[in-house]
Image: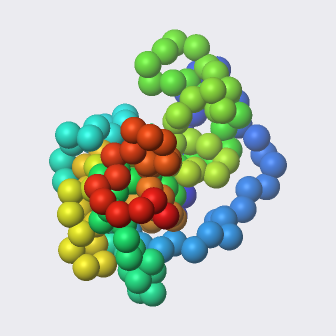
Amino acid sequence: MTDVQAMRPHEEATEAPLPADATLAFIGRIRTPWAAREDCPRQGSLDGPECRIELAPPWDAALDGIERYERIEVLYWLHRSRRDLLRQNPSHGPAARGTFSLRSPVRPNPIGTSLARLVRREGPVLVVRGLDCLDGTPLIDLKPDRCAYTPVAPERDGPKA
Ligand code: SAM
């Protein structure tokens, strides 16, 4: 379901046809304490509350080795966003700006990314801190933090993959 939210002054939408969904495979769900957008943090914090990333089979098997990493990049589909705004009003400013100059969830392909701290793995579930999304948000990918490939890697043990 995509919510079409009311537009604010000076915003501009396109009438170009937008796909109902992307050709992406949702690989799990994210469980967070937030049921409403207004309750979510604007950006996650590494000392935020524990959230659960639940991998759906067969993708749970793809978690093998992830425990090596202290931080992981989480990519998710902001499924409750409208997708048609070219210009929008950031909540923190008076003037409308181009969508691509903002990290707003409202974008043509509403992909959200957060750097999360991996607290522990419980089988097909990763317990993390650092997310900012609604409970039930679809998961689209997980990657080790790209800093893990630099000499200051926060990698816990073992060779870099
Ligand atoms: N950290 C991500 C990023 O920078 O790509 C997302 C940032 S976005 C500003 C976070 C906000 O998106 C939340 O505060 C909430 O208002 C909204 N949001 C969270 N989950 C959502 C979802 N599943 N669908 C639509 N909006 C969502």
User: In the rendering, at what x and y percent does residue 27 appear?
Assistant: 47, 74
Q: How many marks?
A: 0
Is the residue 31 above or below the residue 39 in the image?
A: below
Residue located farthest toward the bottom when viewing the structure as drawn: 58
Towards the viewer: 141 or 71: 71
Q: Nearer the viewer, residue 90 or 70?
A: 70
Give left or right: position of 63 versus 52.
Answer: right
User: For this view, does 82 lie left or right of residue 41?
Assistant: right
Figure quadrant of residue 51:
bottom left
Image coordinates of residue 131 in percent, x first then y, are 33, 48
- Point 21% across, 42% down: residue: 48
Q: Percent from the top left, x then y, of residue 30?
A: 34, 63
The image shows residue 17, relative to residue 55, as above or below, that is above
Q: Does 152 sit above or below residue 53?
A: above
Going by the picture, which residue comes out furthest to the top? 94
Q: Position of residue 124 (x, y in %)?
A: 30, 78
- Residue 106 visible: yes
Q: Inspect this view and state whether residue 136 appears.
A: no
* Residue 96 sits in quarter: top right
User: Which residue: 21% across, 74% down?
Assistant: 122
* Identity of the residue drawn at 57% across and 74% down: 25
Q: Give the side of residue 133 with respect to residue 99, left or right.
A: left
Q: Residue at x 51, y 72 (%)?
A: 26
Coloration mode: rainbow
Q: Nearer the viewer, residue 128 or 146?
A: 146
